[in-house]
Amino acid sequence: MQVVKLSLKKANRIPIEADNINPDNFAGKTAEEIKVIPVWYGNGQCPLGDFFTIDVEGRDSVENTKLIFESDVSRVKRIGQNMTAGEIEINGNVDMHCGFGMKGGKIVINGNADSWLGCEMSGGEIILNGNASYYVGAGYRGESCGMRGGKITVNGNTKDYVGEHMCGGEILVKGDVGLLPAISNNGGKIIIEGKATMPASEMKNGTVIIKGEVFDLLPSYKEEGTEEVEGISYRKFTGDVNVGGKGILLIK
């Protein structure tokens, strides 16, 4: 097992673009080798060691490499971008685009996450033990597909546009969500245990299950009786008929 511990030397006002910080790039490397990995800061690149104290225990494959952030990284973007294996643990808040394009492995965040958490991921798992901002598991503007696979669990609340343009995978939100969860969905599953407003607008495929209160249910859904999931009975709706959708919306 290889464990890489990172701690910010001081709080940074300008965001660090850390798309190179993932187990794929750290596996098998020494602390000195990791320190020289470049990250973007402002309009130029700087070595990672300029910002972080880095400690490495052991050397192993990417599957057996774990990164631990021991400080708040709420101004560090793109942690875990495109990672394929291994694990990242963040003991604090994290900035935007965490887990973007993730293909495998696991990210655990013991804090809050800014927007675009797990956007366009195709595999792996993200567990957020706090609240998320906008566009969890979504696609970037102009993309036809957001999340394609894997799983995101948010143990707190989220803001608007959860799973926008989602095509596969699963999102579980144990708290409330903001406006328009599952907008333009093309597949996958979203489970919301709290409140939701205007869910599943323009959904063509996929399943959305809402256990809490629903506000402003769209009139473009057809009610088709009830459906039982894990011993719980839900009202079943199909749509969005405005786009010829065949999605399933289950409301407790």
Image (tube, rainbow, N blue to C red):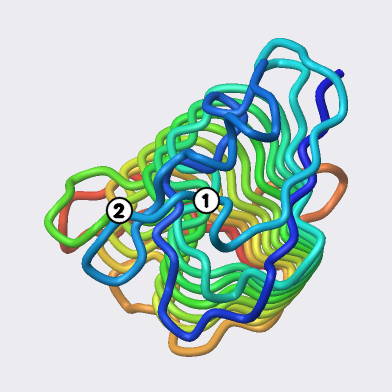
User: Looking at the image, which residue sits at the far top?
Assistant: 61
Whether residue 177 appears in this view of the structure is yes
Quadrant occupied by the N terminus? top right
Question: Residue at label 1?
Answer: 48
Q: Position of residue 120 (x, y in %)?
A: 37, 44
Counting from the top left corner in percent of width and height, residue 162 is at 47, 66
Secondary-structure class at tag 1: helix
* 7 displayed left or right of 145: right
- Residue at image position (77%, 33%) is 66
Task: Identify the residue under disc 2.
Answer: 139
- The answer, for residue 188, to whether it is visible in the render is no
The quarter of the displayed image where residue 173 is located: bottom right
Q: Residue furthest left?
A: 142
**Which of 151 and 27 lies nearest the eye of the viewer?**
27
Mark 2 secondary-structure assignment: loop
Mark 1 or mark 2: name the one nearer the start of the chain: 1
Query: How dense is the environment of label 1, judged by Cα within 10 Å: few (below 14), some, or many (20 and up)?
Result: many
Q: Position of residue 238 (x, y in %)?
A: 40, 54
Residue 219, given in percent of the width and then of the height, sits at: 32, 78
Residue 232, compared with residue 35, is above or below; it is below
Q: CA distance from mark 1 to mark 2?
A: 28 Å
- Label 2 is placed on what type of residue? Gly
